[in-house]
Image (tube, rainbow, N blue to C red):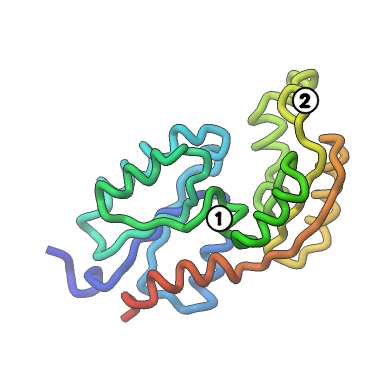
Amino acid sequence: MLSPRMRSSVLLIACGALAREIVELKQLNNWTHLKIKCLPAELHNRPEKIPAAVRAEIEDKHEQFEQIFVAYADCGTGGMLDKVLAEYGVERLSGAHCYESFAGSVAIRGLVEAEAGTFYLTDFLTRHFDRLIKKGLGLDRHPELLPLYFGNYTRLVYLSQTDTPDLVVLAKQHARYLGLEYQHRHTGLGNVEREIREYVIQWQS
């Protein structure tokens, strides 16, 4: 049986790429009942592994918490994440990917309609570009693969969550490395905060 303290708590299973932002939102909103478990951000490069990783966390933790929410969008799982979540009655962030979670569906739709060949960066991906993109895709060892991975892209859009000039400089450098046109759109955390708030506020003690 759950203890009285734990009965009012919510577990948030989150993509590691959203960890900094979600911890910030928890602190800003005093969501003391919200417990956060982040999965490795490297799953971004292997989305087929996301459903099994999320399932494992739900199975491991579901008896300890009153509610579970998943801070992933579909994220390239082709609906497989939703099939897992449906088994447990667990909800997730709306949208096809985390970029949509940050920017909102209308803004992302406008960006896609303007240029389908767009590569997106968030604050996290900007910070960890070398580890997740260069090393993660093997471009540090095989730079000749760059056209294979990015030949169909024409621009890079940096969707920033914070106003950090150093990240803007890095994002521009990444765009130059990829040979893509650079654009910057500031999203803030409003969309993610609203989605999480709508779900977890009802469980706040």
Secondary structure category for the residue under label 1 = helix
Q: Nearer the viewer, mark 1 or mark 2?
A: 2
Residue 7 found in image quarter: bottom left
Q: What distance separates the C-alpha of mark 1 from that of mark 2? A: 26 Å
Q: Which residue is mark 2?
A: 146
Mark 2: few/some/many CA within 10 Å (<14, 14-19, 20+) = some
Classify 10 Å Cα crowding around label 1: few (below 14), some (14-19), many (20 and above): many
Picture coordinates of residue 125 (x, y %)?
67, 47
| Kind of residue at badge 2 | Leu
Please tell me whether residue 19 is drawn above or below residue 44 in the rendered image.
Answer: below
Taking depth in this image into account, of 7 and 105 the one nearest to the observer is: 105
Where in the figure is residue 70, as x and y percent of width and height? 40, 55
Quadrant of the frame with the N terminus: bottom left
Residue name at image x 23 percent, y 59 percent: 64
**Nearer-the-camera pick, 202 or 10:** 202
Q: Secondary structure at mark 2?
A: helix
Above or below for 85 versus 164? above
Residue at image coords 82%, 35%: 178
Q: From the top left corner, tell me how far across and down residue 149 is, in percent.
A: 71, 27
Q: Nearer the viewer, residue 6 or 159?
A: 159
Q: Residue at x 53, y 49 (%)?
A: 96
Camera-side residue of 125 and 92: 92
Tell me, for residue 85, which label it has, or none. none
Q: Mark 1 is on which residue type? A: Leu
Mark 2 or mark 1, which is nearer the start of the sequence?
A: 1
Q: In the picture shown, does residue 80 fall above or below 14?
A: above
Point out the residue furthest to the front here: 113
In this orientation, does residue 116 appear? yes
